[in-house]
Image (cartoon, rainbow, N blue to C red):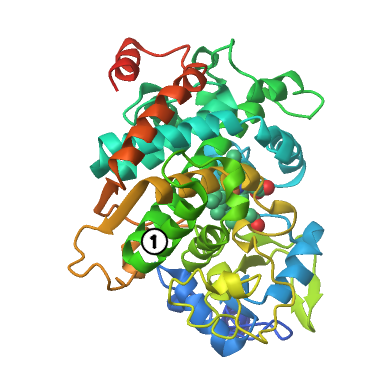
Amino acid sequence: MLASIAVLSLLALFVLSWLRGKGSRESGLPPGPPTLPIIGNIHQLPTKFAYLRFTEWSKQYGGIFSLKLASQTIIVISSPRLIRDFMDKRSGSMGDRPPSRLPDITTNGLSLPLASGPVWKSLRRAVQQLLTREACSRHMPIQQAEATQLMYDLLKQPENFFNHIQRQMISIMLSTVFGFRSPRYADSAASIFFSQFNTNGRLYLNQALIPQSTLYLHWNIIDQREKLGLTRDMVGYLGGVCIEGGSATTAAYLHRFVLCISCYPDVQARAQREIDDLIGSNRVPTSQDIEHLPYIQAIIKEVHRFYTSGPLGLPHATTIDETIDGYFIPKGSTVFMNIYGIYHSEELCERPEVFNPERYLSSEFGTKPNADTTGLRSDLHFGSGRRICPGNHLANSSIIMNIMNLLWGFDFTIADAANRDRHIPIRPEDFTTGIAIGPKPFKCNIRPRSEKHAALICEAYAQARPTLSMFEQELTPSEQKFVEDW
Ligand code: HEM
């Protein structure tokens, strides 16, 4: 009896000390906020806007800190040098994703952004082939035509600007991946696509929706399926990921642009002076104009900096034990790059909370004089290492075309701004939560800058119609009517 009590007591002591060890920060890990037994830092993690808390912690604990979520180790990097040395240069051991049960169940582990190992390698090779700079240059005509339709949509129905932007981005992705477009927001192709994607993620295998005649991009991948090591399911999911990842992020960027430009009317006025000096009101902008528009280039960078789509990117995971700056990072750690924290670092930027494109005119990365820019690059918002966003060329060209068009053609004022000259604060509560963030729908007055601009937009839309119609071979009767009447 006594012996069994002793054994039980020993066992209880062992379990207790094992549990007490759980949640505590192992020696050698980067510093971080104090932990509680068993739960670690779970109680301190906010349910929303984690990037704001991570940024506060980075000020306290430095460019690399750690958190414990029970036995799981989280590493947060807010130093451009460490991102370069660790996430970019040692990308081989940093390029995994943390295991995530739900997406694995819903997509059989075939969703590229979350995939690992050989499946990820095959999908990544294929997507890179789809989205090289050269491949993207072939999509310029449809991107340009879609950007023209956005101007026309805004002319006709400015109050629906939020949806018009989303339609355009879905339509570009549908055209580039499947070869057919979505001419209006409540369009059957787009809505079927998303509803099916959300319910079973298998729409992409539905050959009935893919017009054989016009497919050129995704089709290349289907042709080379075996060479690329892709199964039929993998090809399907690849299309879905491009549509989903490509449209939501770029649309959120343009929503943020409209919000920033409406809240900072002096920035808008200066950009319009620059574009008027170069282009005037006798023609619409073309993609070549951007290199002569330094202030507008600066606005594009500042929108990324001010409120980046993915403030923490997507989480990476380590595949082996690593050391960095004397710290031990165990295999299987989840690693976040704190893009928001870097873009809003007071050590790097002058008044980071202010939307001020001018900062990019005085320095390449928008940093203040004498800031330590080691490792900084201008595309941190696209992620790092071998997981860096493969859609960056496509996204950049859409963003450039749309921003030139919108600044050239329209005036934007936030609907409830009593005083047009006052900067309106942009608060985190105005944004959606999640991995990729954008502003919640907001009201904005959008007016053409003159009758001449409006007439040119109508003319440009008429000229864009033949390009658009190349992707309209399979419209429903109601879509056809919409296109004819619009
Ligand atoms: C403004 C627009 C965009 C932003 C800010 C953005 C940002 C990002 C970020 C931060 C990541 C994670 C990178 C990492 O893990 O280090 C990512 C991954 C990805 N993005 Fe984008 N993206 C944009 C547009 C696009 C477009 C247009 C496409 C597709 C055509 C796309 C497809 C993907 C895919 C497939 C991945 C997963 C890559 C992988 O895990 O290997 N993105 N993106």
Quarter of the N terminus within the rendering: bottom right
Number of numbered discs overlaid on the protein picture = 1
Quarter of the C terminus within the rendering: top left
What residue is shown with label 1? 268
Residue 44, compared with residue 232, is above or below; it is: below
Location of residue 174 in the rendering, given as x and y in whole percent from the top left corner = 51, 28
Location of residue 309 in the rendering, given as x and y in whole percent from the top left corner = 49, 57
Question: Which is nearer the eye, 87 or 464?
Answer: 464
Which residue type does callout 1 highlight? Gln
170 vs 111, left or right, is left
Q: Is residue 268 visible?
A: yes
Q: Is residue 114 visible?
A: no
Location of residue 35 in the rendering, given as x and y in whole percent from the top left corner = 54, 84
Location of residue 377 in the rendering, given as x and y in whole percent from the top left corner = 69, 66
Residue drawn at x 55%, y 89% as measured from the top left: 60
382 vs 300, left or right, is right
